[in-house]
Image (spheres, grey):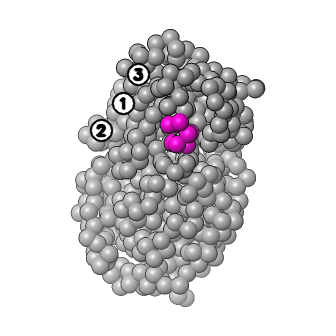
Amino acid sequence: MLRRLMILAAVAALAFSSCAIRTNAQGLPPVQKPFEPKVPQGTGACSIDRPCTEVAPLIISSALGASPLESNLRELTDVIGGRVTGTAANDKAVEWAVEAFRRAGVDEVHTEKFTVPVSWAEGRTHLDVIAPEAFPVHLVSIGWSPATPAGGITANLVDGGMGEEADFARLGDTANGAILLIHTNTLKTWDDLMNEYYYEPAIIDRAVKAGAAAILWMSTRPYMLLYRHNLSVTGELERLPQAVVAREDAMRLARFIAAGQPVKVRLDMPNKIGGPAESENVVAEIRGSAKPDEFVLLGAHLDSWELGTGALDDGCNAAMVIDAARAIRASGSVPKRSIRFVLFSGEEQGMLGSWAYTEAHRTELDKMDAAIIFDSGDGRVTGYSLGGRKDIAAALTQALEPLSTFGPFENTDDADLGSDNFDFLLEGVPTLASNQEPDDYMMNYHAASDTFDKVDFAQLKHNEAVAAVTTYAVADLPEKLGPRQNREQIEELLEDTGLKKEMQAAGVWPLWVDGRRGRQPEAGDASGQ
């Protein structure tokens, strides 16, 4: 997802179903027993008393040198390909990750299951232009869109403009039973990409109220480039059948309507909708030397959309996290605290894997020092988003000192609900989400063009050095990066950062209020009401 999906700041205002993510009592795995290291710490190649300033150059040298990073990512993308949560391809990616972590030399690796409420796969999406002139139209289903009825939907296509209130007022009753064509601006900036998520929920609301049968979204990318998003943050189906139409084809359809020539189409999206499905997170660990029960987490997401092969979002960072484990192990040193390396599944459907992880490991979170998440392609790391935690800024600056030649770093204190840092933030754990330059991430985001050849491996190795040293340094600080916040403090943070409004817009706020997501209320605690 985008820069931890800063874009998801405005995702769909969908109500949460109680079956969306199962609690421990409903099928989440129990908290794992503490890892047992393969070799005794402090013996053999492990030197546990060296300061991070001495270890960092060794980690950097290993990260920048010869490594299996490129071959690992090629296997994940070219061989396995796109990895939609709950599919066989995602299962193969889990197997790939387990084996790659083993080769990296971690102390332990295992998988942890969780349940996705709805399984989904695209059928043969097709649009027939019945009148006034037949021509081929290129389109793909929105992720987790419901299927059309058998035989498809035959209806008038009406031009909904940008989907604003005035556009629906202009359409009046003609929107009832029709398929809407919604225009978009061409993607050029981060704000443009954010707007793909920011405006669509309200447009869907209007379409539902108007009685529309389906929505066709004009692609924001030129040159017939197609991509796939979904707006649900709970893994539930969308409310209407929806598809993305190639920009050039959408404009052609709009020109017919503008010329006064009624357009009639048949939309057939026989998407394959199934019941709950199991998915898995992959969890590896290097055991700490002095405080092994405390830990820092370095993570990325393993799942991807499947039009491309998920190289920039987020395969390059999944492979990078594995190689960061190798580089840390190759240093021959062990930090004071343990490091957990986690590859989450279900991120594209609402951060489902990281949500499940926090549920399953809630009793350990007091001993969790930080969650460090990479989810922004291979662009240069410019610093970290602190998730509203200004109190951790000084300690992070200290931790980043061994990386001075990679900076300068500018850390920000913004917070959003866009990637796998979100549920850790709601649990009060300090979070560091990578801020990165966009490079070619935006145009290829979720698109058919998100493939192995787009990855800049020299830059990815630099990012690995930053990620690995940051993680080691935070795990080796004399004191924790910052305390775990209580529910009242989290509530204040949500208000101060504007995250509360984002959660309300996304339909997530009720889950916080009643304790289904985030740190549990204490007895008699009225916060969140």
The amino acid on which the numbered mark 1 sits, given as a three-letter code, is Gly
Secondary structure of residue under mark 2:
loop
Residue 17, how many percent across, how many down? 57, 28
* Closer to the camera in the image, 394 or 265: 265
Residue 412 drawn above or below residue 99: above
Q: Mark 3 points at which residue?
A: 167
| Image side of residue 164 versus residue 33, left or right | left
At x 32%, y 63%, the residue is 383
Question: Any magenta on residue 299?
Answer: no
| Image side of residue 3 versus residue 309, left or right | left
Q: What stretch is highlighted in magenta?
A: 244-252
Magenta stretch: dominant secondary structure = helix
* Closer to the camera in the image, 485 or 203: 203
Question: Any magenta on residue 247?
Answer: yes
Secondary structure of residue under mark 1:
loop
Q: Name the residue under label 2.
A: 498
Sort mark 1 into few (<14), some (14-19) or many (20+) by Cα contacts within 10 Å.
some
At x 28%, y 76%, the residue is 404
Mark 3 or mark 1, earlier in chain = 3
The amino acid on which the numbered mark 2 sits, given as a three-letter code, is Gly
Q: Mark 1 points at which residue?
A: 528
At x 66%, y 59%, the residue is 81
Q: How far apart are marks 3 and 1 (CA)?
A: 37 Å
Mark 2 or mark 3, earlier in chain = 3
